[in-house]
Image (spheres, grey):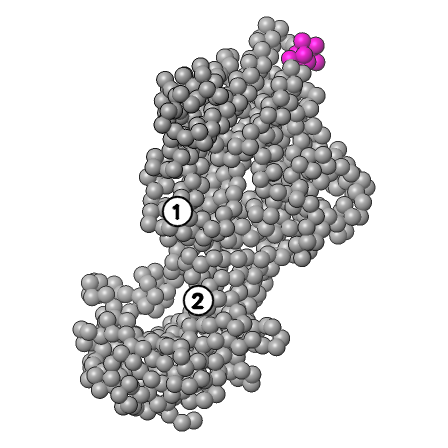
Amino acid sequence: MANIKLTDTLGAFIQIAPEPGSAIMKYFKAVPDLLIGGKSINEISALTLTDPGITALQLGLSFRQPVPIGTNDLKLTVKPEVSTAIAVFVPDPNLDYAHGETDSLFGSDKFEDPLPVAKNDRYVSVGFTAGIIPELSGKTGDLTFGFSDSSTISVTNYQKFTTIPDSPTFLKAVETTIGKLQLPGDVEDLLAMDPDSAVSIDGNGSLRFSGSADLLSVVNPLASVNLAGPLPALQVSEGASIAVGASFQVLTQYEVRVCKTGTNEVHLGYYTRHGSEIAINATASAGIGVKLGDSDLFAAVISAISPSAQADIAELTKALSIDQTEAIHATVKAGIERSLEVGLQYEFSSLAARQAAFLYSIDLTALDASGRQAIHMALSGDLAVLASQGDPLPAGITCLKNIFLSLQKRNHVFKINLLGIYNYISISKLGASIEFAYEPQTGQLTITDTATASRIAAGMVNLGRNPKAKTADLHKLRSVLAENFLITAAYMAESHVVSQPPALRSSHTYFELHDHTNHEAMRDELDTAVGLGLMTRAQQDSCIQGIDEFGRTLSYAESTYDNMLANALFLNGDTPRSIDEYEQAGRGALQMIIHDGDQDDYRLRPAREDPLWTKMKSAGQFNFKPLFPLLREQQVAVIAYDYTLIMWWATAMRGTSEKLAAMQELLKNTPHMDVENNDFKELHVDLAEHLKSVAANTKTDFGRPWGLIAMSLVLGNQENARMSIIGPVLSIAEQRPHPAGAISAAAG
């Protein structure tokens, strides 16, 4: 093969002989003719790698004609109009090299970037871009590294030089780096790389891998209004894990990095680009959990939440038609898959800018045929072997980092809402009226009866892989869950009053997906964390400071109450909480979600000023205008809505507390009385009728952060609470109480 011609803008040129094992000799279909820009060959010919100006030196480099690249088939092409670059990495002169400190080529984290740079080391880099040519098969292959067809990738080669005893010239170092140019498509290419050299390939594409994890089932049992008596002992369990196996496809911008750490040792890493959108597709394996014919996923969920799983499964199987069974199976599968996607997305989003998602150490001399094939697949973007959690890795390959292990250790939650379960006692009692729906943004599953399902379901939708899955409308589900939680909390308090055994805990939840999250929207989401006492204002400001766009984000928050805490929502010892307490909590919640300087900060005055609030109560919401003479009619109408919302909630809570206090008084004055007593039954019916009225008048905003925060403020943030935000720029997970290993991460 002929020599590479490197020409400057003045017409001067030099010839560069490509190394026998280089990509130019192996993959390039034509010898590249290169044009250097920025400085002439004469200007750089005398520069050495120790010259002070070398640190800031970066030159343009372009191909003068298209160059096809490939093996038997054409895979890539370098276009002449696409520029490349030449640069020099000089180690930080301020480090204490005398005491063993070293710089690092890709950053300060030695574990993630295993190429140390000593005081007298220099790295010369040559980068170029190439377009991937679509294959007829539609599949990416050798030299495409999993990157998308018709996209452009950036390839950068790094070659190490030492400045002692004599520093090479910059021009000679450039010649050497170009002559040794590598494109790591196979094990032979890794062997051909010089020790301490590196290659990075960056682009948009997909990584594929598979693994298994345990999803922690978190059950949220909720009552509906027509409950015959106090909360019964449920035949439901929680806290079980659902063993899940799945294959994953991660679509994002990522970098494949190959570092030759020794003569025959290589580190192979995969790094996602910080701030890039990440789309994850999970396909759950068929063999999950307890098998029951084709309904193994359904059986796995029932086994996780029912102490009599086999009996419930058998009874439901008899009651359900084939179509119902298939729809339930598809819905559960879709919910599990989405929960896995959300969990893995959090793991990717939580990576710091220089952290690897996958990192492997490879002893090239110890590889057998299976190991060579595994590396070949990995260099094509398929980590099915390297990321597998089943069989041991092939000989010669050691895993240093696998993001899926983080997913396994984190025990991500699979939320299961049981709407109206207290009215049926057990899952199997729902019979043929049982309905399953999943929320497609969070993956949480809802199990209920047909009547309730009609309020939340978006119907049967064609999801491709799960065409019969039933989805829940986010906004409808959120409102129904909030309404049913309020009812459940009252019944939980009733059970506490009559000293019944503690029931399962119930949760008040809020969730929202933003396709585009600007600064203000992210601040608003974090207001929920502040309102729940999970974050301070200073921490909130620190999370969002200087960031205008956060990309596509998912927010989820919940407060969980047991019987004792539910009772405390309504009663302070033996005394019903006053309506003023609830008004203060409602107004406090408003202060959490509105900021000074906002367009609607006029809403803060009634929330902050007690005398004004008193005047508003005296005037009534239809007579507010004289109290706000400087506001427009529309603004006064907004204040009137805030007032109505707070007063509805405060009145509902106060009314419930009075009825619970009456029950408590009756039980105190009638020793040994049980819930079958006619007087107590009458009080229970009175409570149920009151809750029907509450449900009929529940305001939409109670299902939004305001309602979640207001309930929490009644108890001074004593309940268990957690909140997570998952996005490409910011990912956090905060919770109270803080168990060992609790997550609290911000990607940055």
Say if the magenta span includes residue 679: yes
**Residue 597 vertical placement versus 251 (above, below):** above
The N terminus sits in image quarter: bottom left
Disc marking residue 703: none
Q: How crowded is mark 1: few (under 14 residues within 10 Å), some or many (20 or more)?
A: some
Residue 182 lies left or right of residue 556; in this view the side is left
**Residue 727 vertical placement versus 432 (above, below):** below
Marks 2 and 1, how far apart at CA: 28 Å
Residue on which disc 2 sits: 255
Point out the stretch of residues depicted in magenta.
674-684
Choose the circle earlier in sequence order: 2 or 1.
2
Q: How crowded is mark 2: few (under 14 residues within 10 Å), some or many (20 or more)?
A: many
Q: x%, y% of residue 36?
A: 31, 82
Viewer-closest of 637 and 725: 637
Q: Quadrant of residue 236?
A: top right
Q: In which quarter of the image is residue 157?
A: bottom left
Residue 356 lies left or right of residue 475; in this view the side is left
The amino acid pointed to by label 1 is: His
Q: Main secondary structure of the magenta part?
A: helix
- Who's the residue at 51% across and 35% down the image? 704
Say if the magenta span includes residue 338: no
Q: x%, y% of residue 435?
A: 71, 40
Disc marking residue 519: 1
